[in-house]
Amino acid sequence: MRNRHPVSRRKRWFVYVIGNPRGELYTGITFDNDPERRLREHNAGTGAKYTRGRAPWSLVYVETGFEGRAAAQAREHTLKHDLDFKRRLRTSSRRVKISGFT
């Protein structure tokens, strides 16, 4: 049976960090084929409650390649509590890192 969607269009778990011009960061997970869609939701005010009224947001960091939701949530938890990671994101000149794509 032929696969309808190329590998890049398959849904998978993403952990992402978005930032706004005030220096606020938000870390979340999504099961999607495009983390940009979730970013559009945050900017439209239909994303997480924390991000409403704090737009515009931009993608700062993205990871994928997780076995399932539990693994993505564990990584999200780690990133949310890593103060050094957040500091590096705020001071990095290269804003978006995408890792785990195959």
Image (cartoon, rainbow, N blue to C red):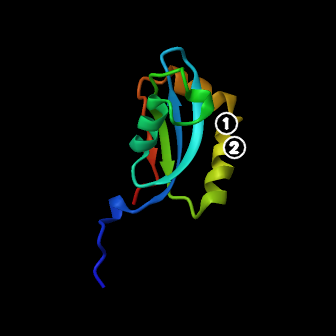
Q: Residues within 10 Å of mark 1 (few under 14, many from 20)?
A: some
Residue 37 image point, x, y percent: 40, 43
Do the numbered discs 1 and 2 sit on residues whose CB atoms are within 8 Å? yes
Left or right, 73 with respect to 67, comes to right
Return the residue nearer the eye: 10 or 63. 10
At x 46%, y 26%, the residue is 57
* Outermost residue, top side: 22
Return the residue nearer the eye: 63 or 32. 32
Q: Secondary structure at mark 2?
A: helix
At x 51%, y 35%, the residue is 46
Residue 12 image point, x, y percent: 48, 59
**Residue 52, relative to residue 22: is it above or below?**
below
Residue 15 image point, x, y percent: 55, 46
Q: Residues within 10 Å of mark 2 (few under 14, many from 20)?
A: some
Left or right, 58 with respect to 76, comes to left
At x 57%, y 47%, the residue is 29
Look at mark 1 in the image and give the residue it sits on: 80
Look at mark 2 in the image and give the residue it sits on: 77
